[in-house]
Amino acid sequence: MVEWTDFERATIQDIFSKMNYEEVGPAALARCLVVYPWTQRYFGNFGNLYNAAAIAMNPLVAKHGVTILRGLDRGMQNMDNMKETYSDLSVLHSEKLHVDPDNFRLLSDCLTIVLAAKMGNAFTGDVQAAFQKFLSVVVSSLGRQYH
Ligand code: HEM
């Protein structure tokens, strides 16, 4: 089981309590779709992803960005039970959606970039390390079904 320090727990709770899911989630997913265009192939039913402007305005991208953050919220609330928390989503992404698990980290990095830009000076090295660790545990839990 992953060990968390008090600082890491408090930092993760704090980040999620202040984060605007409706803003950060869509921005992170849109960035991922623009920077790593092959990720668009999984969202063929989302309509117009023709260019960055279309992606930014696409209501299905926005909606799904919020869904992803709600998915991460579940991990934040279950930090001592991450593998179990993500077992269904791991099955879904591997067996049904066939998402290449490398993409989990790419999306995580886009989220980190969006969050860092929003937090400004509050995004210190220690905060970055705690958030990175949280996302790494999520990514490894989501990837468990693939092993
Ligand atoms: C669906 C979470 C990464 C592709 C979902 C759902 C959640 C979720 C909560 C909805 C599941 C449901 O309806 O029961 C996450 C989290 C990620 C992640 C927390 C963190 C890294 C990715 C990546 C891709 C992806 C990197 C592809 C590049 C999809 C697709 C769906 C989906 C295609 C179905 C969308 C739809 O048609 O509504 N994900 N996901 N996910 N995810 Fe992910």
Image: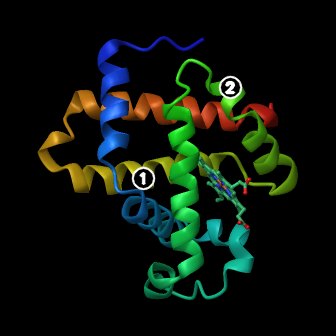
Nearer mark to the viewer, of 1 and 2: 2
Residue 74 higher or lower than 53, as above or below: above
What colour scheme was applied to this rendering of the protein?
Answer: rainbow
Q: CA distance from mark 1 to mark 2?
A: 21 Å
Residue 100 is situated, as x and y percent measured from the top left of the image, at: 72, 51
**Front-most of residues 40 and 15:** 15
Report ligand 1 position as a quadrant: bottom right
First in sequence, mark 1 or 2: give its number.
Answer: 2
Q: How many marks?
A: 2
Residue beneath the point at 46% across and 66% down: 26
| Horizontal arrangement in the rendering, residue 101 relative to residue 12 (left or right) | right
Neighbourhood count class around disc 1 (C-alpha, 10 Å): few under 14, some 14–19, many 20 upward: many
| Horizontal arrangement in the rendering, residue 143 relative to residue 123 (left or right) | right
Residue beneath the point at 58% across and 83% down: 49
Which quadrant would residue 124 be assigned to in this image? Answer: top left
Q: Which mark is residue 122?
A: none
Neighbourhood count class around disc 2 (C-alpha, 10 Å): few under 14, some 14–19, many 20 upward: many
Residue beneath the point at 37% across and 42% down: 16
Quadrant of the image containing the N terminus: top right
Residue 2 is situated, as x and y percent measured from the top left of the image, at: 54, 14
Look at mark 2 in the image and give the residue it sits on: 83
Look at mark 1 in the image and give the residue it sits on: 111
